[in-house]
Image (cartoon, coloured by chain):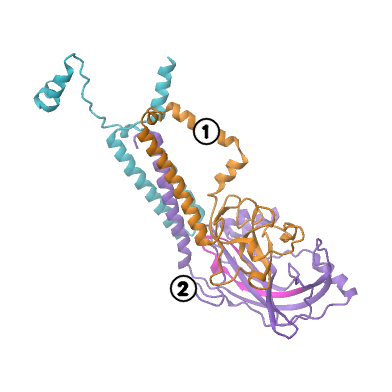
Chain colours: A purple, B cyan, C orange
Amino acid sequence: MYNSLTRIQNVFGFFTSVAFVVAAIIAASDLIAPRTPSGMIEPTSVQVVKGRPHYYSTKKEEYAIIKFSLEADLSSLFTWNTKQVFVYVTAEWPSLGADGAVTQNNSAVIWDNIITSPSADHLSNMPPVALRRLIESTAGRVIDPGRGKFQLFNHKPKYQITHPSGHIAESSDVKLRLHYNVQPWVGALTWDQQGVDLGLWKRLSDGVSEAFALPPVKRKDDAKTSSSKAKTKTKSKAT
Amino acid sequence: MAEQLLDQVRDVVDGQIDFEGQKLAEILATALLSIAGAISFLVGYSLQDIALALKIGLGGTALTFLLVVPPWPFFNRNPVQWLPVGGGPAVTSTQQNLVIDEKLLARQ
Amino acid sequence: MLSSLQNPRQAAAQLLNFALILSTAFMMWKGLSVIADSPSPIVVVLSGSMEPAFQRGDLLFLWNRNLLAETSVGEVVVYNVRGKDIPIVHRVVRKFGEGDAARLLTKGDNNAADDTELYARGQDYLARRDIIGSVVGYVPFVGYVTIMLSEHPWLKTVMLGIMGLLVVLQRE
């Protein structure tokens, strides 16, 4: 501490220690914030089409368009250390061998959405007008009780699902499942607990649809209209 | 001339402080940073505002730097009283007397 | 600084001290690497394709062991495209099959399309072995220094200049 340089070094060194400890305590404070998420999800219409699922697809393959309804309350996931919650809906289905036994399990995201916390609104990637409206909607509050509560009715999927084999029609035992991923400002990333309660963090209540089967491939003339419909981007208002 | 100027710049950059000042600087740095960290967490947690916590933490740190790094006068209030430089030719023998014998020291 | 050259014992002690710091850092890095089973257990985000979750310069901690569950859809993984040595941080959006035979498709949260076009020629899916870790921990901004230094090389010159100036201006 005898000259300025050693004082700068010492102060900076101790600052990093303090910053590390405070960051660790902030990260640990997540554990005492209760989480009580809930969600109801069900498919509303299911289609299987043969064609190119994306503009960059090279081959024609069967793809499924699953419309769904979702009602979720993830507001308890938003604490001071939450940067964003990534909400996503997966379709899960088994592949069956010739003998009817399950050969592999498949899962694919059909819809996702980023819900930023008010503290991270300025970072979110959306058109300027929508962004301004989002920031104004919180009216300067740091915690917005409405964040994470949303309803979708007969909503178009963002992604059509495919299978590497090219065949997906008439798959049975398909389930839709709601998931979330909490992204903190500092600390550990956390996901929905798969059916287990961890201390104050309760499991996602419900969040799975009944099992359903995919229909056979639609005839070609039908396919044209529905695939062009599916290509129009779905902008979800789910904040 | 240039050497003198360089010496002055060195003085400013070096910013030496006395031993009591060093002790004070150490205590100040530790206390201020710890307090800033504690306040930033407590305020941030109670208001659920992480941006505010960051601002308090960084503000407190800036304040600490400002208070501890420059050689403020209150770090130099107890300068070390060096023994005067002996000048005479018979320095070596008398100096030993000086160190051992307190009376001789008082005479100076 | 120059005084140490006159005293070989002091010079040797300084050299050893420097070597100790370097080897400690290296040991911690490799130790973490062994614990996480990942060649690079801490990475700095270099692109904005996962915004707003990860900004450029954020630090990510990776975990590459499947102790409780397999790497599955929704996880954010770091993978290397075959033949290229550029780690990419994206989210797994599709998974077909299990274990070593699993085929995984990834996508950046901020990208409109999935990663099919980023993969190597003829590669449609990732395998588990392409992945060098799943993101488990996050610290914002701390890695930005490395981005600054690599993108603005003149900063290195400035830093060297400041160091040189300090050597000149310091007494002893």
Amino acid found under the numbered disc labelled 1 = Leu
In terms of image quadrants, where is residue A221?
bottom right
Q: Which mark is residue A199?
A: 2
Amino acid found under the numbered disc labelled 2 = Gly
Question: Around disc 2, counting alpha carbons within 10 Å, would you say few (fewer than 14), some (14 to 19), or many (20 or more)?
Answer: few
Residue C73 % position (x, y): 64, 69
Local secondary structure at mark 2: loop
C38 or B106, which lies in front?
C38
A145 or A50, which lies in front?
A50
The verdict on a common chain for dots 2 and 1 is no
Residue C22 % position (x, y): 46, 45
Question: Around disc 1, counting alpha carbons within 10 Å, would you say few (fewer than 14), some (14 to 19), or many (20 or more)?
Answer: few
Mark 2 chain: A
C20 or A218, which lies in front?
C20
Q: Which mark is residue C135?
A: none
Would you say residue A21 sits in the magenta stretch? no
- Select label 2 or label 1 by which is in front: 1
Which residue appears at 74% of the width and 67% of the height? A159
Rounded to the nearest angstrom, the CA distance separating label 2 from label 1 is: 52 Å
Mark 1 chain: C
Would you say the magenta stretch is mainly helix, strand or loop? Answer: strand
Which residue appears at 43% of the width and 59% of the height? A25
Q: Is residue B21 shown above or below C81?
A: above
Q: Which residues are magenta?
A: A65-85
Q: Is residue A91 shown above or below A187?
A: below
Q: Which residue is mark 1?
A: C160
B44 or A167, which lies in front?
A167
Is C47 positioned to the left or the right of A189 in the image? right
Quadrant containing the N terminus of chain A is: top left
